[in-house]
Amino acid sequence: MNQLLLIPIVAFAKLLTLALRMSGRGSGTALPGYLVGRYFPFVLEALVSQVPIVVAITGTNGKTTSQTMLSAVLDQMPEARVLRNKAGANLSQGILSELLKQSNALGRLDFTHAVLEIEEATLPRIATLLKPTIIAVTNLYRDQLDAYGEIDRTEKLIRDGIAQCPSAAVVVNGDDPRTSRLTQGLGNATYYVSLAPEYARYLPYEGQVNSRIPGSEGLEATNICINPDLTTDFSVQGLIRGETVHLPQAKTLSPGFFHVYNGLTAIAIAYLLGMDGATAIAGLQTFKPAFGRGEILTRRQGDRLVNYRLLLVKNPASFSLSLELLRNIPALKLILAINDNTADSKDVSWLWDSELERLNPADIDWIICTGIRAKDMAVRLKYALDAPPGPIPTVESIRQAIDLSFEKASPGDTVFVLPTYTAMLEFRKLMGKTLDIV
């Protein structure tokens, strides 16, 4: 009976998505799933159960990038057909909307793998419905306080989700004390990804770094090199299911030590799914940074061209680590775009927990503050910078900030943009770029 009911439900969801797009009132990444999930709660399980292998990726930072990397790796398998919620809609309604969109008129899904980014508090709510083969946890940093309050609560939510899936293999950040202890007392097979100690010290974890259980299996990145173009080279060594792993040359286009964890997570999951290292590395090299996570957008006017590299910031950890990455860029040109919409956090006190002081050694050409809370950002910089690079323009309109930056930059320059989530979406839209929701 439920299978027959799927036919009109899927038809309704597809028509609603089409109506939202044609009216310009949305893209259908949430509302169809919200309505269907509320009135027909059986649909999520009925759809996702059709996909043999489900990988759930959660954590504070790095979910979208890890998901995109793993999808690129799985695409190297000719027989693989991968479903993912690539628009970043990681609540239950967003996941269900994607499943409805990808199903055919009969409510059938023709995929071998589902790689789903899942918001931290959503995991325990839908874990038993998803029945994931693998759960990956990227990290647990202190987020904005108006999200879930203290990080202890987020840690408990994720552990509860894992506990509901005793047969799932778990891949966790082995350097983060909070994630490395998530499965203690649980029966899940656990694999740890970590950086060699000399690199992990750059990461602002709370507690003793690299607290994984001695003798446990997992992967470690060594010989990490961030290149001048911000691509990252590294080597991989470790043990997965008794198999020795030694990969001397891996590369990712995502900049920074913190994105190496995402690459290690993708490689570890690839091994758990039966892929070989060479194929995983080849897939990783085809990866393109996800929207706002290191992607480069270009503005051209006549023969004048300026590049804009977007590095999403959403909490103190991501902001501080992005600044650490940029401090060695010569003649740094920087836009800080801070909004306080619900998806960004209404409470911008997290700006004061972000280490803006990391900019002091940098060779800064100029900085522009923009977004709804541009003035708050400018005040934070006033206290952080020992020697500001002259007056810092504060322009709430992101469109005006783009125009001003284009005037200030020289042809061929790269301007680094550190936006909050909704500021990133607005910036991309103004640059003629929107999410791929087709």
Image: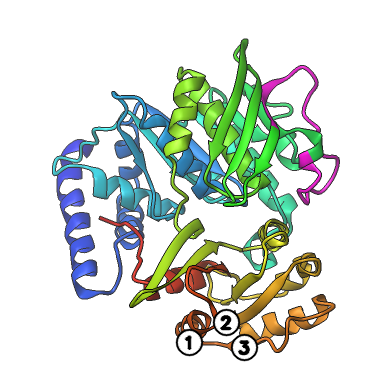
Foreground of the two, 393 or 141: 393
Say the numbered circle drawn on residue 183.
none
Give the labeled residue for mark 2: 370
Q: Are marks 3 and 2 in contact (CB under 8 Å)?
A: yes
Query: Nearer the observer, disc 2 or disc 1?
Result: 1
Q: Are marks 2 and 1 in contact (CB under 8 Å)?
A: yes
Please tell me in which quadrant of the rendered image residue 68 appears: top left
How packed mark 2 is, by other alpha carbons closer than 10 Å (few <14, some 14-19, many 20 or more), is many
CA–CA distance in space, label 1 to label 3: 10 Å
Where in the figure is residue 33, as x and y percent of width and height? 33, 55
CA–CA distance in space, label 2 to label 1: 9 Å
Q: Is residue 262 visible?
A: yes
Give the labeled residue for mark 1: 400
Q: Find the magenta span and give its range.
A: 199-222
Helix, strand or loop at disc 2? strand
| Above or below 76: residue 67 | below
Where in the figure is residue 321, as x and y percent of width and height? 70, 56
CA–CA distance in space, label 3 to label 2: 6 Å
| Above or below 395: residue 414 | above
* Count of numbered tags: 3
Tell me: 414 left or right of 434. Answer: right
Pick the quarter of the image with the N terminus: top left
Where in the figure is residue 405, as x and y percent of width and height? 52, 80
Foreground of the two, 224 or 374: 224
**Residue in the image at 30% along x and 37% along y:** 46
What is the three-letter code of the residue carrying label 3? Thr
